[in-house]
């Protein structure tokens, strides 16, 4: 049958809602291709404000709709057995439906739960209509000695996905329609045996929000229940959707069948070498949305140009989606004004755009795309030298390198600010920005020549930048400066006219790893230093543990996490540039990706986390589903096969 993505967890994991490896820490995601999604945990306990069955994208951000469908079964004339699980402000998890779970699976990217109550077995599957925010949920009675009554209670809200809603405000407006209800004119529910209720359930506790120092309490609106009596083999179908509420979507069984068929098509297009490749192809698919564009991460990130383009090769070129990718490249490159707007706080995003176009042409041989985009890309890069440069980085004509002013110290990918100040200030000339600059000038020069145009000015700029790079970035410690020509610290902590910062960070790897890297691989000392101090099983630390300010844990309230974000926290996406740098200098890479491959079952099931702690045991944090992390693992695996 070929390679397939399958994960399975038994009753011990499903029943554990407190341990760090339990079901409440294994998250699943089903995306709809528009930016909407459903997400939750293996144990059914909602631990984030983003966990729900219908999260709806919109021009003003995502909104949470259907939070949960709580199942209960009545066997014969007995008492209903609840199969759901919620954590409350008291600390109690109730009902204890997770204790009836014998299996949680993610197969072809779709979650499936199986409850067992003696000789009664009930399964739940769900999927979304690709290209619409429309959910189908199927409950199937697998086995039973006789008929079983199934009730599904709809717990609802309609709020900003980043916030909470409580009973202190107005109750949702619930309008009865055929087979269900419309909630706050935002979404519709439909299924068999609908009985409206309309009451608040108070004090649901979201533990991950508490851990982030945010308000963890919300109230849920019990809109009503769907009911059906099932014989073994029967199914109960429920739908929830936004958009055109008058239009009934396909039956839930058809939605799931179509989603499974599409998932297998996505995997086949990627031509996977093994099951890990198949899993990563489906993981990549979740981030690619209409536009086309790329969601940087679920459940809380939106579409960001920098992340989309840094992820481009892995998400599109290594998964058989070059045609979709070309549309994304055209969208960005055809509008320098759009690029300037999107790159305001991402100084290197235009350089990633040139890199993505170059990699696309190299992988596909599509010279027409290269010729089409060469001139607009030249216009975009010329913006770095303009008097009114639209980007945070500006060309220094004295050495041909790009520089950031102190006011733009958070405009690199290490971009966190707290209280208006950059946590990791990198004004001056950051090493990866200028490695990307040298690379972009050479890449664009080659695209320009291939289009039959004059590239002499681009080559002159490239040669000047490369000479300066070779002279300026080699630090006495044996690795590269992270930034040169930075503003020095104020006296008495600092002094002089500028600072060349020798702090050991992974950004220097780009100087060896890019296709037109400014440094060759003759001297492996810098890469070896990175290997010794920054490499972890799940990515690279952003700061060496021996450096001042190192933070080994990315945990606690948001301000504390912000301080650690680029000060020691490890990032899985950096494994890609590390692999390339190792190959450039001849450093071994055997077994390098095994930890990340194992991680696919540890946090966001079937995907790769945004960040992990810099200290062992490298606990995952940030978004459980990260576009760059997935993309670079895909790309790194492909690179190591060649």
Image (spheres, rainbow, N blue to C red):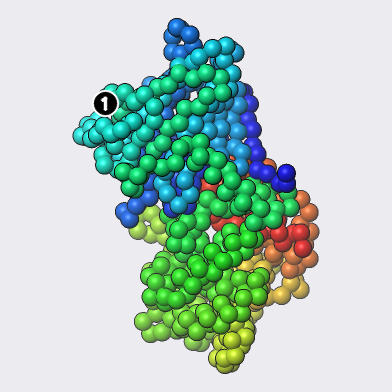
Number of numbered markers: 1
Q: Decide: is 533 above or below 485.
A: above
Instruction: Determine the residue positioned at 45% across, 66% down.
Output: 346
194 to the left or right of 147: left
Name the spot of residue 195 as percent of width and height, x first.
Answer: 31, 23
219 or 565, nearer to the observer: 219
Quadrant of the image for the C terminus?
Answer: bottom right
64 to the left or right of 622: left
In this view of the protein, can residue 111 be seen by the observer?
yes
Q: Residue 518: which quarter of the image?
A: bottom right
Name the spot of residue 19 as percent of width and height, x first.
Answer: 56, 28
Of all residues, the one furthest to the left in this rendering is 170
116 or 312, nearer to the observer: 116
76 to the left or right of 172: right
The residue where tag 1 is placed is 198
Quadrant of the image for the N terminus?
Answer: top right
Q: Residue 457: which quarter of the image?
A: bottom right
Instruction: Determine the residue positioned at 49% across, 72% down.
Output: 330
Q: Decide: is 160 above or below 198.
A: below
Instruction: Determine the residue positioned at 53% across, 33% down.
Output: 125
Q: Residues within 10 Å of mark 1 (few under 14, many from 20)?
A: some
Name the spot of residue 470 as percent of width and height, x first.
Answer: 64, 79
Label 1, secondary structure: give it: strand
413 or 449, nearer to the observer: 449
Instruction: Determine the residue positioned at 71% across, 75% down.
Output: 520
Name the spot of residue 299 as percent of width and height, x first.
Answer: 45, 46
483 to the left or right of 422: right
171 or 491, nearer to the observer: 171
């Amino acid at each position: 049958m070929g390679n397939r993505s399958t994960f399975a967890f038994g009753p011990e994991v499903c029943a554990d809602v407190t341990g760090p490896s339990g079901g409440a820490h294994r998250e699943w995601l089903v995306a709809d291709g528009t930016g909407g999604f459903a997400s939750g945990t293996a144990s059914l306990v909602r631990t984030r404000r983003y966990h729900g069955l219908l999260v709806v994208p919109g021009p003003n951000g995502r909104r949470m709709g259907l939070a949960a469908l709580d199942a209960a079964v009545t066997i014969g004339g007995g008492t209903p057995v609840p199969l759901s699980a919620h954590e409350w402000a008291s600390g109690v998890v109730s009902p204890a439906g997770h204790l009836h779970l014998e299996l949680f699976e993610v197969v072809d990217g779709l979650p499936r739960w199986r409850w067992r109550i003696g000789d009664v077995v009930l399964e739940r599957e769900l999927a979304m209509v690709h290209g619409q925010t429309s959910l189908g949920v199927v409950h199937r009675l697998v086995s039973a000695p006789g008929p079983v009554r199934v009730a599904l209670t709809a717990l609802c809200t309609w709020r900003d996905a980043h916030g909470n809603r409580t009973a202190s405000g107005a109750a949702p407006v619930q309008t009865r329609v055929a087979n269900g209800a419309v909630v706050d004119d935002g979404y519709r529910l439909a299924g068999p045996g609908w009985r409206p209720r309309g009451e608040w359930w108070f004090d649901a506790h979201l533990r991950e929000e508490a851990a982030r120092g945010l308000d963890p309490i919300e109230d849920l609106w019990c809109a009503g229940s769907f009911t059906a009596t099932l014989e073994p083999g029967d199914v109960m179908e429920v739908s929830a959707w936004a958009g055109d509420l008058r239009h009934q979507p396909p039956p839930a069984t058809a939605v799931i069948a179509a989603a499974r068929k599409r998932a297998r098509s996505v995997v086949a297009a990627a031509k996977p070498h093994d099951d890990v490749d198949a899993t990563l192809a489906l993981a990549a698919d979740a981030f690619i949305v209409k536009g086309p564009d790329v969601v940087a991460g679920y459940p809380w990130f939106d579409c960001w140009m920098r992340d989309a383009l840094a992820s481009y090769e892995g998400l599109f070129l290594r998964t058989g989606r070059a045609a979709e990718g070309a549309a994304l490249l055209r969208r960005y490159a055809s509008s320098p004004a759009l690029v300037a707007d999107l790159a305001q706080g991402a100084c290197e995003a235009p350089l990633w755009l040139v890199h993505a176009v170059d990699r696309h042409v190299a992988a596909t041989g599509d010279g027409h795309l290269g010729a089409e985009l060469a001139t607009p890309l030249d216009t975009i890069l010329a913006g770095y030298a303009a008097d009114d440069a639209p980007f945070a980085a500006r060309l220094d004509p004295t050495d041909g390198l790009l520089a950031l002013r102190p006011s733009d110290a958070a405009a690199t990918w290490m971009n966190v600010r707290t209280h208006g100040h950059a946590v990791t200030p990198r004004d001056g000339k950051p090493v990866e920005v200028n490695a990307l600059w040298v690379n972009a000038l050479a890449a664009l020069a080659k695209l320009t020549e291939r289009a039959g145009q004059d590239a002499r000015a681009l080559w002159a700029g490239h040669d000047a930048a490369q000479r300066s790079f070779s002279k300026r970035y080699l630090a006495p410690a044996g690795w590269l400066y992270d930034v040169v020509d930075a503003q020095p610290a104020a006296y008495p902590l600092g002094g002089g006219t500028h600072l060349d910062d020798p702090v050991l960070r992974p950004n220097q790897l780009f100087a060896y790893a890019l296709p037109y890297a400014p440094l060759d691989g003759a001297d492996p000392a810098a890469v070896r230093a990175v290997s010794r101090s920054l490499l972890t099983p799940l990515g690279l630390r952003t700061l060496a543990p021996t450096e001042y300010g190192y933070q080994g844990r990315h945990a606690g309230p948001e301000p504390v996490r912000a301080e650690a974000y680029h000060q020691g926290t490890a990032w899985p996406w950096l494994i890609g540039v590390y692999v390339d740098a190792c190959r450039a200098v001849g450093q071994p890479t055997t077994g390098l990706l095994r930890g990340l491959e194992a991680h696919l079952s540890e946090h966001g099931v079937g995907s790769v986390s945004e960040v992990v702690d810099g200290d062992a045991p490298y606990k995952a944090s940030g978004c459980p589903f990260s576009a760059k992390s997935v993309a670079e693992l895909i790309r790194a695996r492909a690179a190591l096969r060649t």
